[in-house]
Amino acid sequence: MRINTNVASLNSQESATNTQNNLRNSLEKLSSGLRINKASDDASGLAIADKLRTQANSIGQSISNGNSAVALTQIADKAMAEQSNILDIVKTKLIQAGTDTTSNEGREAIAKDVNKLLTQLNNIATQTNYNGTTLLQGASAGTSALALTFQMGETSTDTIATDGAVRSNTDGLGIDGLKSAANVGSAGVFAASNARSAMSLVDTALNTLNGWRADFGSTQNQLESAVRNQMTQQTNIKAAESVIRDVDYAAESANFNKQNIIAQAGTYAMSQANAVQQNVTRLLQ
């Protein structure tokens, strides 16, 4: 019998060390809720889970972009709805002015009303913006609004765009000549014949305005569809990441209890290995 090197005790210590490492890893997983806490836990699983997390976060930002874009299109649509209402009133005023039962004085009052309404139409075009970006005309009244592009995906090609030809003011709608009674009538008189001839201009303006509203409306529908689709994608991607990254508490709790029992047994084994060596002293008696 040899006592200089207690091989049995060394074996027991090695097993106990491995068991303690397993216990520490199991506790780390139980406390963090993650099966993968470091690359050594599952190198390939970590790479896949991180890629899925990046994809889910990217789609989450895309959803936020889409919701902001929907708000933008709603602002533009509501502004143009008010402009359409103004043109409806202007058309009604022109019909009123186009009959000979209306006096010259009445038509002059109508002309002033029309002038104010069209000024407000231009004000709406100038003031309607989202975060500083004008939506119904360009930076100046003589230019069209820029095409708006919304990033709605993970790649540079995943975009949704609006029509960039919107210039929803009296000039862009072709009714700038109605802005003052002097331009509508002759010698400053708002004549019934001029009121009748201006009706077709308002009809054309309404058709043009409705076309721009339709573009914003279809863009909004496209955005809302994209947001719904990406919400589903994000949910499924997060579920896939969870399968790889998250810990199964039932399985890991069972593993922890097993390792704990093995650790207790290992401690007992070390004490027995050390006790066996004490039997050598009997040979010296």
Image: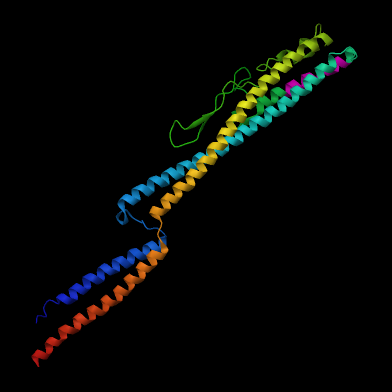
User: In the rendered image, which quarter is residue 202 located in?
Assistant: top right
Report x, y in % for residue 63: 52, 40
- Residue 191 visible at all: no
Residue 101 magenta: no
Which is more toward the observer, 77 or 203? 203
Q: Is the residue 55 above or below the residue 171 in the image?
A: below
Question: What residue sits 45% from the left and 41% below the top?
Answer: 58
Could you tell whether 112 is left or right of 230 in the image? right
In the picture, the quarter occupied by the N terminus is bottom left
In the picture, the quarter occupied by the C terminus is bottom left
Report x, y in % for residue 166: 61, 22
User: In the rendered image, which quarter is residue 100 located in?
Assistant: top right
Instruction: Write down the region rendered in magenta.
Output: 106-120
User: In the rendered image, which quarter is residue 248 located in?
Assistant: bottom left
Question: What residue sits 37% from the left and 68% below the top?
Answer: 254
Could you tell whether 184 is left or right of 40 in the image? right
Q: Is the residue 20 above or below the residue 105 in the image?
A: below
* Farthest bottom residue in view: 285
Residue 119 magenta: yes
Report x, y in % for residue 47: 34, 48
- Residue 48 visible at all: yes
**How many badges with numbers are in the image?**
0
Question: What residue sits 54% from the left and 41% below the top?
Answer: 228
Question: What residue sits 68% from the left and 31% below the top?
Answer: 78
* Farthest top residue in view: 187
Q: Main secondary structure of the magenta part?
A: helix
Report x, y in % for residue 114: 79, 19
Could you tell whether 1 is left or right of 108 in the image? left
Q: Is the residue 188 above or below the residue 164 in the image?
A: above
Looking at the picture, the colour scheme in use is: rainbow
